[in-house]
Amino acid sequence: MHQTITVELGERSYEVRIGPGILAELGPFVASMDDARRSVVISDRTVAGLYGAEAVESLREAGIETSLLPFPAGEENKNLATCGELFDAIFALDPPVDRRTVVVALGGGVTGDVAGFVAAAALRGLRWVQCPTTLLADVDASVGGKTGVDHPTGKNLIGAFHQPSGVLIDVDLLRSLPDEQLRNGLAECVKHGIIRDVDLLDFIEDHARQILARDPGIMGELIARNVAIKAAVVSADETESGQREHLNFGHTVGHAIEACVGYNRISHGAAVSEGMVAACNMAVARGLIEREAADRVRDLLARLGLPIRHEGLDGDEIWRIMQHDKKARGGQVRMILPVVLGEVATFEDITPACVHGALAALREG
Amino acid sequence: MHQTITVELGERSYEVRIGPGILAELGPFVASMDDARRSVVISDRTVAGLYGAEAVESLREAGIETSLLPFPAGEENKNLATCGELFDAIFALDPPVDRRTVVVALGGGVTGDVAGFVAAAALRGLRWVQCPTTLLADVDASVGGKTGVDHPTGKNLIGAFHQPSGVLIDVDLLRSLPDEQLRNGLAECVKHGIIRDVDLLDFIEDHARQILARDPGIMGELIARNVAIKAAVVSADETESGQREHLNFGHTVGHAIEACVGYNRISHGAAVSEGMVAACNMAVARGLIEREAADRVRDLLARLGLPIRHEGLDGDEIWRIMQHDKKARGGQVRMILPVVLGEVATFEDITPACVHGALAALREG
C-alpha cells in the first residue's frame, strides 16, 4: 500500500513516503536519522489537537525526546512574529536544543512554511521532517523545500530554500479535511496535469467521484502521481531559476485575485482555479491551445467543485498587483501558459489588454 | 597594491579584494554581476554617516539604483526585530525589489550578520556584497557566509549560511576605527596563527608596531594572510561540520566570559584573548604544548593591548554557560586546543576541573 518517491537533489535528496497509517512511522524515521537526539513538533493548534498526541507518541516510543510547540492556526499567523514566538519556545527548552535536534512540521501548508523556515534559521539550519495533513500540502508544499512567511506587502516574501530530511504523507489524515481544503489540493493536481502530464488529467476525470469521497487507495495514487511530477520539476531546478517557474501556472492571476479580493474571502484553491481558467483563456486568445482544451480544464475544475467564474473583478487592480508579484522582473509581468495540455511555456510579453481580455472571459463564464 | 583571494566553494565561490580605495570599486563590481538591477545598502547609522555617501555614489555612478537603509548601531540591535524593520523598509521600496536586487552590507560584524541574514531571507535569498569596515569583519566575518542575529538566550542563534557574491575590503577605512575595535580584529589574527600558521605569529610579532599604527601596506598584508587562512578552512568545510570548528579556538571560554561578565562590559576581542590564554593554559596542563609556547601567545596578546588576565571570574557560572553553548552536544563541552603552535585539535573530554584550572591560571596571570 505504501509508495515511496525520491526527490533527487544530490546530497539534499530525500524520500516522500505515501500511504495509510504512515504517521506511526514518524518516530522510527526520526530515530533512523544520523545522530538525531530530540525533536520539536511544530503544529497549529487545530492540527495539534487532532494528531499532535499521535505524532508525539510515535516519537517518544522510538526513544526521541519530544516537545510539541503549537502556534495559532491560520494564514494570518504566517508571519515573522509567529517565528519569533517559536524561536522563544525552542530556545527556552532545557536541555537546550543543539544541531542534532530535528524539527517536525505537522500540519498543512502554513505549518510547513513556518516550521520549515524556523528549522532553516534556528542554529543556522536544523534538519526537519514534514508530515503534511492537507491534500494541498501533500501534493505541493511537501516537495521543493520552499519555506517562509508572509510580509504585510506580500505572501512568502521572507523565507529560505531548506530541503526536509523526509516527508511522511498519511492518507488517513485526509478524512478529517474540510471540503474546501480538499479542493485547494485538487486545484494543484489539475495544475500539475496541465503543465506536465495529460494522463493525470485523465486519471482525475476517471476517478473524480472516488477522489471527492477520499477513497484511500485512489488518494494514495493521486498524491504519488502529483509528488512525482513536482519532484521531477524541482530536481531539475532546485532554486527556481528555470522550469520550476512552470509551477506558477494559474498562480500569477490567482495570487492577484487573492490579493484583490482579500485572502480571507477566497480560498487559495479557488483563486488558482480561476487563475488557471484565465490563463487558459489567454492561451486560446493567443492561439496556443484550442477552445476545446480550455473547456476541458473548465469542466474538470467545475466537477471538482472549483470556481470557474468570478464576476466583478477589478481588472486594473489585478494588473497592478501582478506587476508587483515577486516573480515579475522590473515590473514586467511573466505568465506561464499552456501550449498543449501537458506542456507550458513562459511568456514575457503580457500586456494589460491580455489580462483584461482573460478576466472578461472569466467574468462571463 | 590590491590583493585578491578566492574563497573556493564550488558554484558559491567568490573573491575577496583587499587594498586601499577599494570602496570606490563597489559600483563597478555590482554592475558587473549578472542581471543586477538595483541595490540596497544596509549600514548602521554610525558607518552610514562615515561611508554611506561614498558607497551610494559609487553605485549610482555605475548606474545601479540604490537605497541606503540605516539601522541603529550596536550588538544590542542585532536581533529579529531589526531584521523585521529592515524587511519593512526593503518591501516598501518602489519600484519593488525583485530577485535582481543586490544587498550591500557596509559596516562591521553586526552589519554583515544582520544584512547577510536579511539578504538570505528576503525573497528566499538575494545576492549580497560585503564591504567590511572593521578589522574583525575584514579577517573574520568576510569569509564563510555565516549570517544571523542574536536571541535573548544566546548569540547568533537565528541565521543562515549565505555566501556573498564578493567582498571588498578597503584598508583605508581602518583609519577611523577605534583602538578597541582594532584589538578585536587582532585577537582573531592571533587565533588564525595559532590554529593554522605559526608564520603568521612571526609576522605579527615582527610588525606589531606598524600594525598598531595601521600602516596601510602592512594591514593589507595582514588581512590577506588572515583571509587566506579562513578561506582555506571554510572551503574545506562550508557548513561547520568538521575542521571549521577549529575557528572556535578561544571562543568557547571567550563566549562564556562575555555572557558571564555581560556583553556590554567586555569587548569580543578581550574575551577571545582571555579565552585563548585559558585554552593555552589547558593545553599546557594536558601536556599538549610547552609552557614557553603558551607564554609566547600571552606576550604577543599583551603587546597588542589585549588582556591576558581576568580576576574574579566565576568558574561555576562559566562552566554552566559553556554547557549551553550551541556547539556543545547534549551538554558535553567540546574545546579546541593547540597541539603545537599552528595546529589544533578538538577535545570532547573537557571536565569542570579542566576549566577551573585554566581559569585559575587566568586569574593569577
Image: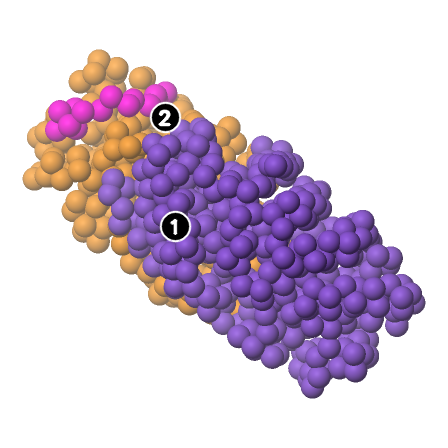
Chain colours: A orange, B purple
Residue pictured at 61% horizontal, 54% vertical: B214
Identity, as a three-letter code, of the amino acid under mark 2: Ile
The tag on residue B286 is none
The quadrant where residue B302 appears: bottom right
In the image: residue A339, left or right of residue B245: left
The image shows residue B62, relative to residue A79, as above or below, that is above
Q: Which of the chains bears the disc numbered 2?
A: A
In the image: residue A114, left or right of residue A19: left
Which residue does the numbered mark 2 point to in the structure image?
Answer: A195
In the image: residue B302, left or right of residue A176: right
Q: Could you say where residue A58 lies in the image, as x and y percent from the top left? A: 58, 62
- Can residue B235 be seen in this snapshot? yes
Q: Which of the chains bears the disc numbered 1?
A: B
The quadrant where residue B24 appears: top left
Is residue B249 within the magenta segment?
no
Q: Could you say where residue A80 lies in the image, as x and y percent from the top left? A: 37, 59
How would you rate the neighbour count of disc 1 (Cα within 10 Å): few for under 14, some for 14-19, many for 20 or more?
Answer: many
Picture quarter with the C terminus of chain A? top left
Nearer to us: label 1 or label 2: 1
- Can residue A186 be seen in this snapshot? no
Is residue A351 within the magenta segment?
yes
Which of the pair B176/A150 is nearer the observer?
A: B176
The span picked out in magenta is A343-356
Identity, as a three-letter code, of the amino acid under mark 1: Gly
Which residue does the numbered mark 1 point to in the structure image?
Answer: B52
**Spatial CA span between label 1 and label 2:** 47 Å
Q: Could you say where residue A294 lies in the image, as x and y percent from the top left? A: 23, 22
